[in-house]
Each structure stands twice: as C-alpha cells, then as structure tokens.
Image: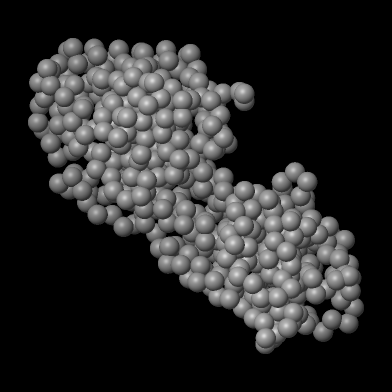
Amino acid sequence: MPAPVTLDGHSLSIADVVAVARRDVPVAIAPQALAAVTASRRTVEAAVARGDTIYGVNTGFGKLAHVRIKPEQARELQRNLIRSHASGVGEPLPRDAVRAMMVLRANVLVRGTSGVRPDLPALIVAMLNAGAHPRVPSQGSVGASGDLAPLAHLALALIGEEEEGATLRGKGLQPITLEPKEGLAFVNGTQAQTGIAALLVHDAWILWRTAHAAAAMSLEAVRGTPAPFDARIHDARPYPFQQRSAALLRGLLADSAIRESHREGDPRVQDAYSLRCTPQVLGAVGEALGFAERLVVTELNAATDNPLVFDGDVISGGNFHGQPIALALDVMAIALATLAGLAERRLERIVNPDLSSGLPPFLARQPGIESGFMTPQIVAAALVAECRILATPASVQSVPTEGNQEDVVPMGMTAAWKAGRTLANAARVVAVELMAGAQGLEFLKPLTPGRGVARTFAAIRKAVPALDGDRPFTADIERVAAGVRDGAFDPDAPGEAP
C-alpha cells in the first residue's frame, strides 16, 4: 500500500493529484488542518448567532443576494443551492478528472478559510478511498462563481440525492446534512477545471519530451545535421527550455553512424526550419507549459470559495473566478497546437520524395502499387487543422450570467475541454511521426542512428512492426499514441534516452 497523500490545504502537488486520480493512492487529512477547519467553522457559527448578514448564509445567491433568509430556512437554502445548480449536461467527466476534482475540493476545504465542519472534507476523502465516484456532466460551467454545476453534482452525492447519492450509499457511506454556508462553500471554486488542468500539465510535459524523440528520429531519417543544436547557439539566446530542448536532442543524436555517413560531401547547407529550429519552437512550447504549470500549482492550494473566513472575519470576494486557470488552459492548447504543427511538418519531409533525401515515396516498399504512409500524413494534417481551430481562446469568450451579476466569466471548463482534445490530437500526430521516422530508418540500415534514437526505435518496434506492405494504420496509430501518453517513448523515462 503506497503512503497516502496527506491534505493540509497548502502543499498539494500535481504529482499528488495524478497519484490520487490515476493510481488510487489513498488520501488522508493532516490533523493540524482539521484544527484550522474547526476554528473557521466557529467563526461562521458566531457570525450567524450574532445575526450578521453573510452572503449565501442568510441571503440568496447572485442577483438574489438582497433577499434575506430566515434562520429556520438556512439548511433548506444550502440544499436548494445544490439541487438547483446540479444542472450540468453532456458526457460525464472521466474517472480521473472526477477524482482530481474531489481531492482538490477536499484540499481547499481543509485550508481553514471555508467555514465548513471537518465532516465535509472527511466525507470526500472517504469517498476517494472507497472508490465512490459520482457522475459529473462535463458541460454547463462558465468558470465563475467557479465550477458551479460540476461541483454541485459532486455535492449531490454528499447529501445522498439522485443517482450521485446512490453512488455514495453503494459504498457504505452515509450522506451529510449541509449546515449554513456549507453548500455554498462546496460549489464555489475552480476545482473541476483545475483538476483537469493538473492532469493535462502532467501529460503535456510527457508529450513535450516525447516530441523530441520523434524530432530526433525524423532528423536521422532524412539525414539532417545536428549542428544547429550546438549548446553555444542556445546559450546565446538563453531561454531555459530552448536550452533544455537542444540538450535533449544532442543526447538523442549522440554517436550516430547515420550522421557520420554524410558528414562529408553533403551539398545541403542548412536543413529546413522544421528540423533546424526544433529547439526554438519546442523551447517556446516548454516556456508556455511552464507558465501554465505555475498557475495550476498555485491554484491547487488556493482558497477559491466565497465568502472566506479570516481571523474572526467573514469577507466576500472573488477568488472563485477561474480566469488564471482558463488562461493557463488556453495557453496550453496554443502551445500543443504548435507542437503538433511542427511534428506534422517533419512528417511531411519524411514521406515526401521531393524532401526526404532519397527515401522512397511515402516510405512504401513498392511505391505506386503501395501507398505507404500517404494517408497517415493526411490524418496528421486533419488533426493539426483541428488543433489550430481549438487554439482559439475560450477565456475571452465571456457571456454574462445570473442577471448580469456575473458579467465577466472565463469559460474555464470549455478551455479544459479544448486543451484535452488538443493534447489527444497532438499525441496522435507525434505517434505518426514516430512511426514514419522508424520506417525511414529501416531504409538506412545497416547504418545506425544515435544512441537515444536507437532506443526510441526499439520501443516503437515493440509497439508496431515495420511496414512491409500496405495495411490499415488505425490500430497502429492508436497503440503508439497510447504509448506516447503513457510515456513509453519519453526520453527522460528510466531506461530511455537521456
């Protein structure tokens, strides 16, 4: 049994989220965090006892905040909030996204600024550890006041209602009755979009590194030169991820017999940009992913509900607004569309006989009677076109809601959907490039590629055989794409290239 991920509201990492969401690592709550939760709850109870006006505790919500709620209606108010806001539509979120949302919601509640009882985060943790995952529709959130609809569907499970509540009872867990502020504290927050964003950041870095393995293999297949990856060039333009990109490529290409075979007498002066400028382009992609990661890491441990409790005060604010995460997701989508477009251009150079430096047309054994990689390149082109459409930002598409009270909203869940689909498309494009690059190396034997490329080639051949005649490519592409997502061709993975 792995050590549990312990929640304290301050130290949750992306690696923790991935462990809980995908490997079912158990979750615990730090004792000192429960003490902070109890203290914040006492502040809320004292304010209610004094008759203070507190948004969402003894008032209506949104445009109805001017409506005062009687004390005897406090529980009904919280219950109705959950019922009314559980109005999401569309396909359910995948299991890992729901678990990511749950662990983030529990982590925020134990921070001690939400004013809930310890029972609430404790029940979420119990659900995670029991494998109780409610159905959460993927559409219906504008990202402010947080992810209202997705979180409300999760809250339905906690109060034991509808299909979601059956999920709770099916695991032997008992529902909870929400006290003043607890329903609002639960649905105000960015945990749906942030949970998805955390998983995507993790996956995007794997894809970023794997794109270098594909680039290096393509360079070898068309007998390009590694000279543009010289460290001195990249130290002269010292973007950290450009430098890291060039270093990855140098490691993959080291000790290449293919390179030595054309070092002398090659009439080409410079390779095309898609080969020569790989560190500059993938370096920029890395800088964008680093930006997105910084925002997501901050949000993992941020208090994002409203109002918040501080040292005896209950203060209304706007931390539920999802603009930072929506922007991070949009930047990721743009960066991954760039990565996919670069991979497709290298793929074109491998399959196009006018550009491939002597490889057979479309890498076919018998060009003409066979089409080889002609259609996989078309598939990659279609995926790249879709990525570019998906790169249009969601975070600028505000549509006011709640009687114009929420008049600027960030569309974070739309940004999450776009980024996720873009990543899936990009993984398939890189998969096709890896397959084509490996096929190109078949025609250069007995010359051997660099050490890192050789390891990538071997990993590809474990997944799919060489093309010795036309065959359907769908299963091959999906198998390699799954390996891309799982890190099977990641140069930084144990046993892979440096």
Q: Is residue 386 depicted above or below 88 in this figure?
A: below
Image point 29% across, 41% down: which residue? 149
Q: Is residue 211 left or right of residue 172?
A: right
Q: Is residue 219 depicted above or below 141 in this figure?
A: below
Q: Is residue 273 left or right of residue 61?
A: right
Residue 142 at x, y = what percent? Answer: 30, 48
| Quarter placement of the N terminus | top right
Closer-to-camera residue (497/478): 478
Residue 53 at x, y = what percent? Answer: 16, 23
The answer to which image quadrant residue 65 occupies is top left
Image point 61% across, 78% down: which residue? 374
Closer-to-camera residue (119/281): 119
Q: Can residue 157 be seen from the camera position used here?
A: no
Image point 72% across, 52% down: which residue? 491
Q: Is residue 331 depicted above or below 179 in this figure?
A: below
Residue 236 at x, y = what percent? Answer: 71, 60
Q: Is residue 142 left or right of residue 62?
A: right
Image point 46% across, 67% down: which residue? 386
